Amino acid sequence: MMPEHPDLAKVDVSGVRRVINVGLLSDSPPQPGEWVLIHVGFALSKIDEEEAAAALQFLEGIGQAYADELAALAESRIE
Amino acid sequence: MRFVDEFRDAEKAHALAAKIAALCEPGRQYKFMEVCGGHTHTIYKHGLEDYLPETITLVHGPGCPVCVIPMGRVDDAMHLAAQPDVIMTSFGDMMRVPGSEGSFFDAKARGTDIRMVYSPLDSLKIARANPDKRVVFMAIGFETTAPSTAMTLLRAAAEGLRNFSVFCNHVTIIPAIKAILDSPDLRLDGFIGPGHVSTVIGCRPYEFIARDYDRPVVVAGFEPLDILQSIYMLMLQLAEGRSQVENQYSRVVPWNGNLVALKAISQTMELRPYFEWRGLGFISHSALRVRDSYAAFDGERLFEVPGVRVADPKACQCGEVLKGVLKPWECKVFGTACTPETPIGTCMVSPEGACAAYYNYGRMHRQRVAEAAGTGGVTHP
Ligand code: SF4
């Protein structure tokens, strides 16, 4: 964060440092270490880690079910 | 990269595809519209249609900001840019959009001062550095981009900048979706809702689609697995006889959107009575203009704008593509007269345009399959 410009923040975009405007998040300003979605120089939204984890868990779940299915299929000998 | 790679895993994509296929009712055809051009891009880049059963068709919607700008507006912008002492600023993908006298790039080559900017805030910098010039920002985009323009207007007013204005072409997605739902050309089974627009407007504005039109909506993220999961969620709703608004992209989209952003928009802009969209025609209350209280920053009031309606070139079928009635490759000039290097229509310009996405990623698998089967590609007279 940049105390002298409360609307601005330094972010790391795929390894490149950039200054963006976080004025649209003034309801709940992002803290260092949080992830944000950036569009044309403005942070539009914070990425909700819990929701991301839940989404991944769903995907892991079906990935696992599919892997199990494949494994079961590989073992089956239908003749 | 975090929050990206995890959503691109091929094995999980196959698992989702299998679940989707299992939900298909025999003999039923499904048509889903992905409203947002960002989704269209992901779908072709990753060949997602190849993961889906043949009975599911994805129809590309109008959510590509530069695609829906009508030619007359491009000409208006060009006229504005040509006024004495004007510096026009524009996003990169707007630079190649053809007007009737060529694109911004062509005008720039002829000596008009048009500069590409990454953010509307860059236009303020240019205005400060050039006090004897008048800087006009060509504002385009849906609700995703409107807040940035709004914040820039607020900033310009706070600074008392006298030489900055906005040529406002912001459009709103809901009236366009409604126009598509009301059009008799297309029967859709559900919508993949625009993820980035929804970070601003939230999920509530789509409720009328579920309630009044009985169609499910799933707001989706932009990685391949996000889109496949959203299609799965749509199929599940249909299988269970539900029509609801669901949020697959909850890691980014809050259900109520971004209230600060909405407030900034309503402080500086208001709905126009109507606006012309390329291909969709005039749609009421579908675009924003600068409010009276910010008139000093409104390019449309500071300069004379011809406002002439210009018909699309005859060969151009962008309108049908934007409505989802035609597939890009069904347009007669696709890939021949119209390519990303020499675009005739807007859908070939932006990476989010359906024609450019098809062209760049060469995903014409289904077309080839259809032709090999002798059913032909062109389904519309
Ligand atoms: S091929 Fe070109 S003219 Fe045809 S619909 Fe696509 S962008 Fe428009």
Image (tube, coloured by chain):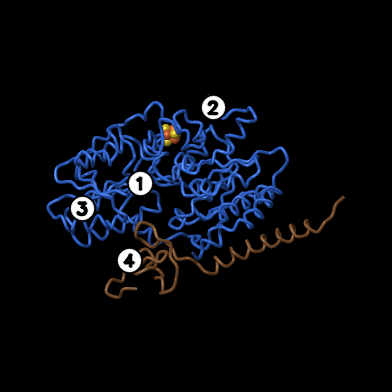
Residue occupying the point 32% across, 49% down:
B91
Q: Position of residue B84 (x, y in %)?
A: 14, 42
The circle on residue A16 is: none
Q: Nearer the viewer, mark 3 or mark 4?
A: 4
In the image, what residue type sits under mark 4?
Answer: Val
Q: Residues within 10 Å of mark 1 (few under 14, many from 20)?
A: some
> Chain B takes which shade in the image?
blue
Q: What's the mark number on residue B380?
A: 2
Q: Is mark 3 within 8 Å of ligand 1?
A: no
Q: Are marks 4 and 1 on the same chain?
A: no
Taking the image as drawn, is residue B284 in sight? no
For label 1, the residue is B93
Residue for point 48% across, 37% down: B323
Q: Look at the numbered disc 2 and say if its residue's Cβ is closer than 8 Å to ligand 1.
A: no
In the picture, the disc for residue A19 is: 4
Which numbered circle lies on residue B164? 3
